[in-house]
Image (cartoon, grey):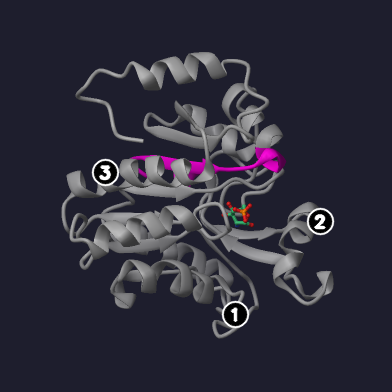
Amino acid sequence: MEVVICATPDEVARVAAAKVARVLRDAGPRAVLGVATGSSPLALYAELAALAASGRLALGEVSAFALDEYVGLPYEHPESYHSVIDRTVTRPLGLDPARVHVPNGMAADIAAAASDYEAAIKTAGGVDVQILGVGSNGHIGFNEPTSSLASRTRIKTLTARTREDNARFFPTLDDVPRHCLTQGLGTIMDARACVLVAQGEAKADAVAALIEGPITAMVPGSVLQWHPHATIVIDEAAAAGLTLAGYYRETFDNKPHWQAYAR
Ligand code: GLP
């Protein structure tokens, strides 16, 4: 696991975008990008949009797969992840909407929608780089604590904490859906690289548990310790609970030149 501690949230976005852009370039014009909702990756998307706008990153033929979607929230709803991904990823990055996929939380047969989504990722050749945030309870995607570390795309019930965290996007807590369709931890682990971003002190406990705690279904993001190419990019506030912060800084500052990337 590579841990990069940045001075500011802006630097988090720049470093993470540099990492994602490198993987996409290496994967070629038809690369497959995994995208997350949430506020954490917004500045990273803005950086990728700027790279694309200046011609330094070609995204026109790139496919994208979102991690998750609420069950039973119509696509047109402004907080459906179909809408959120369209607004924050597809349009700003100039992706081809036909190549952007979000799980179908409105399907009559949710189990079939889940297996169709797995099949679509496979058909696209698998995800080259998966962008991730982390929930305050350590979830990635919507894989809540006690999710199987081998899980695939399926329906999940949201925890009270996640519904409270996401209530800011809805008129009342009662309006937050109870169920979601999410890529599983096993699905996410199939991505060839993962880049997780987190900012702010509210994420410090989850970040410390994910990076330095035991691998446990109680902290679903901790499964990334088992991933061969996981990069965690965080700001100082989110890094506050880390025991080996000095080591992570030293590692980044002394990378061999062929491995280094700019802040
Ligand atoms: C949401 C999403 C996750 C996201 C997380 C954190 O519920 N399903 O993919 O990483 O919660 O959100 P934020 O970045 O807004 O803190």
**Quadrant assignment, res 201:** top right
Q: Position of residue 210 (x, y in %)?
A: 60, 31
Q: Name the amino acid type tagged 1.
A: Pro
Badge 3 element: helix
Q: Residue at x 76, y 66 (%)?
A: 167
As drawn, 120 above or below 249: below
Quadrant the N terminus occupies = top left
Looking at the rendering, the quadrant in which ligand 1 lies is bottom right
Cα–Cα span, label 1 and label 2: 22 Å
* Mark found first going from the N terminus, 1 or 2: 1
Q: Earlier in the sequence, mark 3 or mark 1?
A: 3
Q: Name which of mark 2 and mark 3 comes first in the sequence.
A: 3
What's the residue type where badge 3 is placed?
Val
Residue identified by numbered label 3: 23
Quarter that holds the C terminus: top left
Residue 151 visible in image: yes
Q: Residue at position x 57%, y 27% from top?
A: 211
Q: According to the image, label 1 marks what residue?
A: 78
Q: Quadrant of residue 192?
A: top left
Q: CA distance from mark 2 to mark 3?
A: 36 Å
**Residue at mark 2:** 160
Above or below 263: residue 245 = above
**Mark 2 and mark 3 residues within 8 Å of each other at the beta carbon:** no
Q: In the depicted view, which residue is nearer to us: 74 or 84?
A: 84
Q: Nearer the viewer, residue 18 or 80?
A: 18
Q: Is residue 189 magenta?
A: yes
Q: Which residues are magenta?
A: 186-203
Question: Secondary structure beneath disc 1?
Answer: loop
Relative to residue 251, is residue 219 depicted above or below? below
